[in-house]
Image (tube, rainbow, N blue to C red):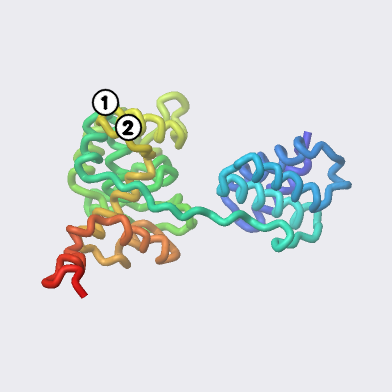
């Protein structure tokens, strides 16, 4: 129905070297907006966007989802319709910056131990031991693993910058066992058993949660906790924050500094002033 519009969005997005996943998300959001507004495209105005987003906000939509719609429609209006757009009139929503969920080393090990599928076990161990995002682990290829240098080459990063991260001895042993027992893949390291292509990121999160439940972890967790835990545990072990930033592939150091707030203060050797010689006395 809106194929011509989607084609134009894709053309404009590709000029800016946007990722395919971003382009698909833009098309899906714009398509939903147009179906909801149900007007001739030539008659659209910023009032239609304001009404659409206001309704979403009043219905309790999450700020991240709201801002996703905002970015998609803004791109459509400015790049395709060539309409004026004022961010003061149609603002984004402020995000709540909650601290990331960090699992203990014991909890991580219990999750791995309670993952019966060898491929899934290797994926979870790789995310934790190397600090990978889900999107990065599913895009790993056989040649990205260097047994000699004990590194992993991350090519499909969120920031579109290649980087290297560490490969632990224990994880290398697990990856070797997986590789020999699960078809010896030479291209995609963790191919889908059904299609032979990249795994669905959502499926990884689903089996991670199942393994966490089997491990007796009742907190709300997701597979991204592996990355948070990797960073926090390195910081607790005294690794300089600059090296952690490089391993995670963070462009903005403020993204890494959040782990200062979630690390175990006893391992950092921080002592409360209340425990000093005079306690809290003044």
Q: Is residue 24 left or right of residue 98?
A: right
Quarter in which the N terminus is drawn: top right
Answer yes or no: is residue 186 visible.
Answer: no
Q: Could you say where residue 91 lies in the image, as x and y percent from the top left?
A: 67, 58
Farthest residue toward the left? 277
Q: Is residue 14 left or right of residue 35?
A: left
Q: Nearer the viewer, residue 26 or 196?
A: 26
Q: Could you say where residue 118 lies in the image, as x and y percent from the top left?
A: 27, 29
**Residue shown at the point (37%, 37%) measured from the top left:** 220
Q: Element type at marker 2? A: helix
Residues at discs 2 and 1 in contact (Cβ within 8 Å):
yes
**Residue shown at the point (46%, 34%) measured from the top left:** 202
Q: Element type at marker 1? A: loop
- Residue that mark 1 sits on: 116
- Give the Cα distance between marks 2 and 1: 8 Å
Q: Nearer the viewer, residue 210 or 63?
A: 63
Say if 54 sits above or below 83 in the image: above
**Residue shown at the point (66%, 43%) measured from the top left:** 58
């Amino acid at each position: 129905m809106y194929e011509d519009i989607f084609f134009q969005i894709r053309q404009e997005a590709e000029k800016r070297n946007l990722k395919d996943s971003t382009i698909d998300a833009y098309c899906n959001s714009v398509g939903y907006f147009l179906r909801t507004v149900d007007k001739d495209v030539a008659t659209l105005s910023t009032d239609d966007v304001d009404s659409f987003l206001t309704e979403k906000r009043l219905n309790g939509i999450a700020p991240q989802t709201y801002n996703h719609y905002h970015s998609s429609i803004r791109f459509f209006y400015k790049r395709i319709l060539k309409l004026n757009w004022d961010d003061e009139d149609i603002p984004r929503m402020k995000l709540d910056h909650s601290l990331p969920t960090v699992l203990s080393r014991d909890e991580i090990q219990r999750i791995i131990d309670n993952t019966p599928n060898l491929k899934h076990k290797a994926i979870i161990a790789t995310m934790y031991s190397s600090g990978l995002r889900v999107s990065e682990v599913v895009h790993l290829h056989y040649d990205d693993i260097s047994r000699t240098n004990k590194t992993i080459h991350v090519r499909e990063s969120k920031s579109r910058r290649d980087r290297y991260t560490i490969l632990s001895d224990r994880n290398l042993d697990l990856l070797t066992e997986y590789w020999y027992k699960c078809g010896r893949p030479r291209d995609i390291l963790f191919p889908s058993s059904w299609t032979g292509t990249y795994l669905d990121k959502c499926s990884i999160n689903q089996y991670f949660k199942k393994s966490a439940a089997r491990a007796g972890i009742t907190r709300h967790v997701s597979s991204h906790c592996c990355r948070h835990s990797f960073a926090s545990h390195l910081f607790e072990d005294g690794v300089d924050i600059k090296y952690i930033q490089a391993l995670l592939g963070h462009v903005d150091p403020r993204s890494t500094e959040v782990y200062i707030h979630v690390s175990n203060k006893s391992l950092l050797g921080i002592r409360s002033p209340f425990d000093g010689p005079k306690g809290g006395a003044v």
